[in-house]
Image (cartoon, helix red, strand yellow):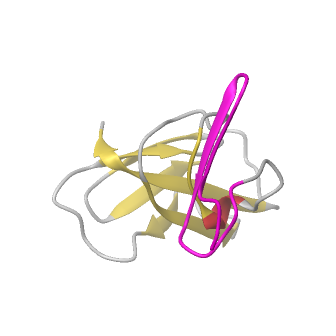
Amino acid sequence: MAVRFLANAGRIIMSKAGYDASPSLPDQFKLFDSNWMATGLLIATLRKPWTGANPEILLFPHALHYAPATDFTGAGYTTSTALVVENPNGRNSGEIVARIYAVSI
């Protein structure tokens, strides 16, 4: 049976079913990590390489009834169906990684 909750001094981690909660657990197997910039129940992690488009659009796995809180590097905004990442610095390489939470903004 997996230990799904870890509370240490200054940090709390909750894992998905079947995974032990630990600081070394990859984010895609976590439901919550107090070290994340935004907090709330994690519903999706999106990854997409930069294509050079401005803006970059990351579609959610399914439409939501709200614009969710997100945690990503860059400027942008969310709708009920996508995260729109603007590219003000002309960045054209690397990867966009965004966490989508079950709370509205």
Left or right: 43 as drawn, with respect to 51: left
Q: Where, by quadrant of the figure, is residue 10 drawn?
A: top right
The mark tally for this picture is 0
Task: For the C terminus, give its image quadrant.
Answer: top left
Q: Which of 84 and 92 lies nearest the eye of the viewer?
A: 84
Residue at the left extreme of this rendering: 65
> Which residue range is magenta in the image?
1-21
Tell me what residue is drawn at x 73 percent, y 47 percent: 90
**Residue 5 within the magenta-colored segment of the rendering:** yes
Indicate whether 62 appears above or below 58: below
Q: Position of residue 30 (x, y in %)?
A: 60, 58
Residue 39 in percent (x, y) is at 48, 37
User: Which residue occupies 53% across, 72% down?
Assistant: 17
Magenta residue check for 34:
no
Residue 74 placement: quadrant? top right
Q: Quadrant of the N terminus?
A: bottom right
Quadrant of the image occupied by residue 52: bottom right
Q: Is residue 73 above or below residue 8?
A: below
Residue at (69%, 70%) from the top-left corner? 51
- Which residue is farthest top? 10
Decide: is 64 above or below 13.
below
Coordinates of residue 65 in the picture (x, y in percent):
16, 59
Nearer-the-camera pick, 11 or 81: 11
Q: Residue at x 66, y 70 (%)?
A: 19
**Seen from this angle, which residue lies furthest front?**
1
Q: Nearer the viewer, residue 21 or 79?
A: 21
Give percent across and percent down for residue 87: 62, 47
